[in-house]
Image (cartoon, rainbow, N blue to C red):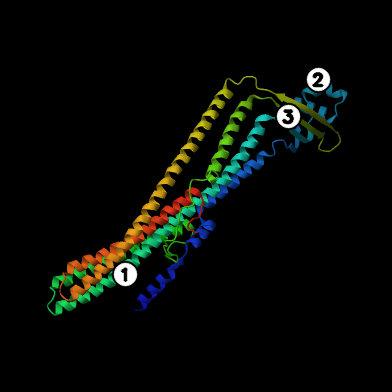
Amino acid sequence: MATLLSISNTLAAQTKELSLAEAITTAKTNNMDLKLSQLQQQYTQADAEKMQNIYQPQVALSATGMMTNVPLNAFGSRLQQGSLVQEDFIPASLNNPTSLTNLNAQLSIQQPIYNKDAVVYRDIMQDMAKAAEYQSIRVEYVINHNIELLYRQLQLTTEAMTVLAKAKTTAEANLKLVNDNYEVGYAPYADVLAVELRISEIETDISQQEKNINAISNQLNYIMGTENGIIYTPSDALHEDISIESITDIPTDRSDYLAWEEQLKASEKNIKAKEYAIAPRVNAFASYELNERMDFSHGQHGYLLGVQASWTIYDGKKTEYETQKARIQLEQAQTAYSKTRSHDEMQLSAAKDRYSQAKTLLLSAEKSIKSAQEVLRIRQDRVAEGLEKVTDLLTAETQLSAAQMKKITALYQQHIALSEINMLTESNLSE
């Protein structure tokens, strides 16, 4: 008994009530795909910021100490130190110099002046950073949609459990009725067995739905980034007061469309960048250098200033081929974008149709429930009087359960269609 109580308490501790809003909020904080998307956005932004500095100077400071008796190095070091004397030009001194120490300190600066393709690449990275930002927004919408799909499945399964519980209560009442008739000789024992079989079928269905709830809960835990093992019960019910009348078309400023457009801008600029690859480049450079002996007995300093202009006149048609590839990549991106928009319009139309079909199914299910309830009541009365077969009673009870399942399935399909419409149009009609 104590063991059973412990298991019961453990299961209770693992069960948690969950609202759709809470599930979405939790995923916004913990979902791994969303985090990866945000990190990609930060990475792209960092690249864009790096490219803002293409005309910033590069400054380097270096210091080198050395000792040598290599003739050429020794003579050069004396020359840089300003310590050459007449005796250093004697052949014997040139060929066999004494060991010499040298400390070289150098400050160098490189300053880009003109680099056209780098400017274009800077603009490309800005476009890519904006695209990543829009794409991150889109990922959040898709994750919200996936969460809602799971949450609606959880609602459907929970509602199905309620329908099955009512069906079991009705079947147990029918069993009592048939048992009473059996005891007074109005019904054969086969009728009792038939009702017991129906109860067993319902219990099997309930067990399967419990497994489904566990599976859905595990998927919710994964997408929300929470610990595995928590079993959820929905705090929100499937409601009927939803409408899509305000939806006409997919907005042109949908986040992923904006991302596509930024990527297309970047692809167009990439063509220019390839063309500018052979454009002239101009860079300035300067250095200040100090050379001293290690004992600081001799030394001098000097500077170097200059400007370098370079221009690739011909690169073996490499730029031409790279530009051609960039044009093809742009055309591919434009085609993919058009395909995406066309496919999304088709999906929106299909989702609207599914919503309308579900609405029609819902009205039909509500009528079926009323009819099935009345039929079941009549069958129960007639069986109690011994005027009806138990098989007819079981059929009536099964039909009522089927009609109730039909209703919650229609509600589920309505919400699923609405969620897809929300995702395609980036709206929140269900709120």
Gap between marks 2 and 1 measured at Cα: 112 Å
For the point 19% across and 67% down, the residue is 392
N-terminal of the pair, mark 3 or mark 1, is: 1
Give 99 or 154, whichever is nearer the viewer. 154
Q: Quadrant of residue 77?
A: top right
Q: Is residue 362 visible?
A: yes
Q: Position of residue 127 (x, y in %)?
A: 61, 39
Q: Position of residue 366 (x, y in %)?
A: 33, 62
Q: Secondary structure at mark 2?
A: helix
Q: Quadrant of residue 230?
A: bottom left
Rate crowding at label 1 as few (under 14), some (14 to 19) or many (20 or more) other CA atoms within 10 Å.
Answer: some
Looking at numbered disc 1 in the image, what kind of residue is underneath it? Ala
N-terminal of the pair, mark 2 or mark 3, is: 2
Q: In the figure, is residue 104 to the left or right of 38?
A: right
N-terminal of the pair, mark 2 or mark 1, is: 2
Gap between marks 3 and 1 measured at Cα: 82 Å
Rate crowding at label 2 as few (under 14), some (14 to 19) or many (20 or more) other CA atoms within 10 Å.
Answer: few
Q: Which residue position holds label 2? A: 91
Q: Name the disc covering residue 165, or none.
A: 1
Looking at numbered disc 3 in the image, what kind of residue is underneath it? Asn
Q: Which residue position holds label 3? A: 283
